[in-house]
Amino acid sequence: MKKLMKQLAIVLTIALILAGVAGNGAVAAKKAKISKSKLTLKVGQSKKISVKNLTKKQKKKVKWSSSNKKVASVNKSGKVTAKKKGSAKITAKVGKKKYACKVTVTAKSPNKTPAPAPKTKEQLAKEDRDNLTAMVKKWVAGGAKISTDIDDRRYYLWDDDGRLNTIRVCDLEGAEDYGVKGKIDVTCFTALERLELDSNRGVTEVNVKGITTLKYLGVGYTSVKTVDVSTNPNMESIYCNKDAKVVGAKSTVKIIRW
């Protein structure tokens, strides 16, 4: 009887051991699957995907491919890189089994440049002085007979904030030519109210676009053929040649031709 009981105990122990082995085998035999069946990336982004529940041996034999490498590429380790907007299917092949991930690539978000902080009155005043200094030096180098002193009130006036208010290099009688020549661009002076260049016969063009503060423009007895004030809403008076074409002036603007 004791011998029989001993044999039954041995059989039961073996059965329990085999049951444990079978249970561990069931855990190890989990179904393989891809870590991502769908993936959305922006152009330039990357994401690694994998096939789960593979043995070490199987992992070494995974072969990755892309249906459209121009949209999304994949390397040997499953790293997907978005190339351009569109869609592609990334496939992992393990033996005869295939596991797929649909990749959608969207456009790269544009870099939003933060708006610059508004300039202070002091900064604007310094810019006006620096710009006028450079402009006057250029005029004088080109033969203009004027002072290089930007505080000379015969030619330049400044408002209470230190902004350039007036450029007056002219002779209203038409007797004296100060020798200013070429194309004159004063668009950097955003607080300018008066620009007087009459009698400088060498001046061929004047650019005042976007100066909303400008009220008076004098280009009589110059070589300016067209006066464009379409972006100067506060213009009040224009002095120009008889044959000059005036563009964009409101009906309220006083036009005097010489």
Image: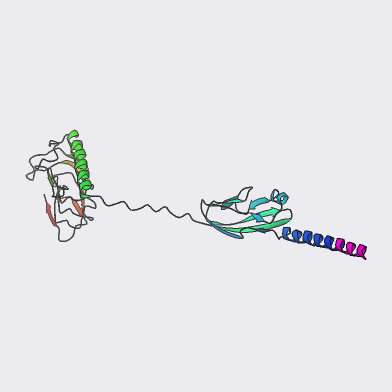
Span shown in magenta = 1-10
Looking at the image, is 207 positioned above or below residue 40? above
Query: Residue at the spot x=72%, y=57% of the render?
Result: 97
x and y percentages locating residue 165 in the rendered image: 15, 49
Question: Residue 182: in sight, yes or no?
Answer: no
* Colouring rule applied to residues: rainbow
The picture places residue 26, in percent across and down from the top left corner, at 75, 61
The structure residue drawn at horizontal position 20% and vertical position 47%, both measured from the top left corner, is 122
Foreground: 123 or 233? 123
Relative placement, left or right, of 204 versus 75 is: left
**Image spot of residue 102 (x, y percent):** 60, 59
Residue positioned 9% across, 39% down in the render: 176
Q: Main secondary structure of the magenta part?
A: helix
Residue 39 visible here: yes
Is-magenta flag for residue 92? no
Residue 251 vertical placement versus 223 (above, below): below
Q: Estimate the x, y position of residue 85 in percent, counting from the top left.
A: 52, 55
Instruction: Please name whichever residue, 165 or 90, is drawn nearer the observer in this view of the structure.
Output: 90
Quarter of image, res 144: top left
Q: Is residue 180 left or right of residue 94?
A: left
The answer to whether residue 4 is magenta is: yes
Is 120 displayed left or right of 115 in the figure?
left
